Image (cartoon, rainbow, N blue to C red):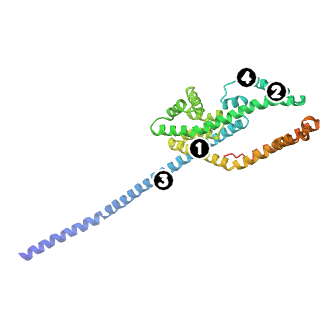
Amino acid sequence: MFGLDIMLVAFIALAGCSAGALAYVFMFNSIAEERKAGRRLETIKSAQTDRAMVKASRDRVAEVAKRRKSIQDSLKELDDRQKTRDSKIRKPPLKLQLKQAGMSISVERFHVMSVVSGLSCTVVVFLLGAPLIVLPGALVVGILGLPRWYVSFKRKRRVKAFLNEFPNALDVIVRAVKSGLPINDGIRLIASEAREPVKTEFRRIVESQQMGISTPEACMRMGDSMPCPEANFFGIVIQIQSQAGGNLSEALSNLSRVLRDRKKMKAKVQALSMEAKTSAWIIGALPFIVAFLVYITSPTYIMPLFTTSVGHLILGVSGVWMTMGVLVMRKMINFEV
């Protein structure tokens, strides 16, 4: 019986192995097909993933290229505008000069005051006993020279005051933007709380916004009434940020730091050139000092320069040469930063 049970178990096991072998033989093809289908499915999924990654990479590259092109177009447009503004800054019309100087008079009134100045200079020179040939020159200087020199002096002083206060105004805008306020609120804050002439320039921006002009365009117009590169820098930063995006507070903070560094560089250049300027002043004043000392010691020796026609001619030629020398020295010791 025991031997019979062993044979039965062996028979059952052998039958099972045979059935399994037969099942494997008949199902081998289907199993292989399923494996091939699984591998193909994995290949397709990996290919789709690769295509998605390539597409995403292409989209990122296209977005970066589009943004770069937008920035380049903006810079080109701003460069063209800047060239136009530079030409206006070098040779601005009289109306714009009066606006840049902070003078609220009209062009017609300025011409009237120029004529009055010319007549006053002519009368003063005549009362001092100058020859009649000098009177037309005094009239021209009084009409064209002194009034325009005064406007130029007012422009330079106003620009200097603007540059002293402008970095502080930018810092206030940066803090306002970092605290969550929009840039328009920061501009209005400067327009109401800052010192002159920064207050007036930002008030013009606010007034332009109220007339429907966009903030970047209103900021770009600051360079028309304030003839300095720093005002144009501010407009360019706002214009680029509005078109290309980015961190506005960081951009304005960097601009403020650049303006302060430019101010330090100007002060350093002025200090280094002070020796040359002092030498130029001494050289320019030396002829007058020598003439005064000669007049004190030997008045009869130098008086023919003032009493004879030949002396007047010598004085005129000497004055022309002195003016040319002073202008050349002034050009040599003035540095633009």
The amino acid on which the numbered mark 1 sits, given as a three-letter code, is Leu
> Which comes sooner in the sequence, label 1 or label 4?
4
The amino acid on which the numbered mark 2 sits, given as a three-letter code, is Val
Extreme-front residue of the structure: 297
Q: Which mark is residue 26?
A: none
List x then y, in percent, for residue 162.
61, 36
Q: Is residue 283 visible?
A: yes
> Which comes sooner in the sequence, label 3 or label 1?
3
Q: Which image quadrant for residue 36?
A: bottom left
Helix, strand, or loop for circle 4? helix
The amino acid on which the numbered mark 3 sits, given as a three-letter code, is Val
Judge by depth and name the residue closer to the eye, 79 or 321: 321
Residue assigned mark 2: 124
Query: Does the CB distance between marks 1 and 4 fall below 8 Å?
Result: no
The alpha-carbon separation of the residues under discs 4 and 2 comes to 22 Å
The alpha-carbon separation of the residues under discs 3 and 1 comes to 44 Å
Helix, strand, or loop for circle 3? helix
The alpha-carbon separation of the residues under discs 4 and 3 comes to 70 Å
Q: Which mark is residue 109?
A: 4
Q: Which mark is residue 259?
A: 1
Query: Does the CB distance between marks 4 and 2 fall below 8 Å?
Result: no
> Which comes sooner in the sequence, label 2 or label 3?
3
Numbered circles on residues, count: 4
